[in-house]
Image (cartoon, rainbow, N blue to C red):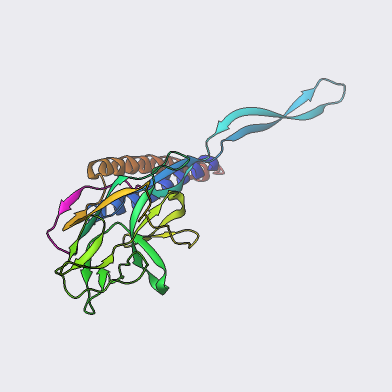
Amino acid sequence: MFKGFYTATAGMMAQQRRTDLLTNNMANANTPGFKADQSSLRAFPDMLVQRMDSKDIPVEKSFHVPVQQTIGSLHTGVYMQETMPNLAQGDIHETEIPTDVALVERAVPFDENGQKGALFFVVEGDNNELRYTRNGNFTIDEAGFLTTTDGRYVLNEANERIQLQSENVRINEGGIIFENEEEVARLNVAYANNLSTIAKEGNGLYRTENGQPLPSAIGNNEISYHIQQGFLERSNVDTSQTMTEMLTAYRAFEANQKIMQAYDRSMEKSVNDIGRVR
């Protein structure tokens, strides 16, 4: 009885985590550069259930031999194995703000598994560590440095901070920044070939699992991209699909909940009725 109870509990936990993931995707549907998370559910190994029994041997003195009778397999539940960001390009929309930039992929190589790589802006994280983002909603702070909206410094191709004199700048398709038609810096664009080495950190930031910096895409002949000034990349969350998946996860959670309630009623009847002394 309790084996099925635990199986239903595992299903509820998996669907609850999946609902949390989908809710976060929906909450960031309007966040520039946000990449939707994807989850994968995996089943625990099936369990072979057998019944312990005994068999009488027809001899002069009664003799019992223990035997096992196979009942069948029992599913032991599912769990959410991993989450992976969907790094597909989002739609581009115009803002007409000079410090807003969109990173538009043209040609990005595939790895040996047939998975497409991804490009990122490079920003300065905590303790001067490198972090990566697709959110090009930049601004200029009081000291004239180009930063993200949460105050992280945007870095150039030498991974140095970019200091400007005003917001009247021009950024060409190669990411080169001009002030008064003089080149002052170039936005660094990093390339991730193996997406399994990239992890989300929150606030639209990514980091590498091993702490090593990603190589720059600048000068890589296999990579083609362009920068659009005055534009932002939208979130790639598909709201209609996400709502459908949320309803599916909710229904699966509800079905497992009803199974647990049925087990609870069975156990209540066992304790109160079957075991009653008359």
Residue at 61%, 33% in the rendered image = 48
Picture mark count = 0
For residue 63, which quarter of the picture? top right
Left or right of residue 205, residue 196 in this image: right
* Residue placed most toward the observer, 45 or 170: 170
Return the x and y of residue 84 as percentages of the image width and height: 40, 49
Return the x and y of residue 155 as percentages of the image width and height: 32, 67
Magenta span covers which residues? 86-98
* Residue placed most toward the observer, 123 or 199: 123
Residue at 28%, 64% in the rendered image = 186
For residue 244, which quarter of the picture? top left
Quadrant assignment for the N terminus: top right
Query: Is 119 situated above or below 43?
Result: below
Quadrant assignment for the C terminus: top right
Return the x and y of residue 143 as percentages of the image width and height: 24, 79
On whether residue 96 falls in the magenta region, the answer is yes
Question: Farthest residue in the left direction?
Answer: 96
Question: Farthest residue in the right direction?
Answer: 60
Question: Farthest residue in the front direction?
Answer: 182
Residue at 29%, 48% in the rendered image = 105
Query: Is 67 situated above or below 247?
Result: above
Left or right of residue 181, residue 276 in this image: right
Residue at 14%, 69% in the rendered image = 168
Return the x and y of residue 26 as percentages of the image width and height: 26, 51
On whether residue 28 falls in the magenta region, the answer is no
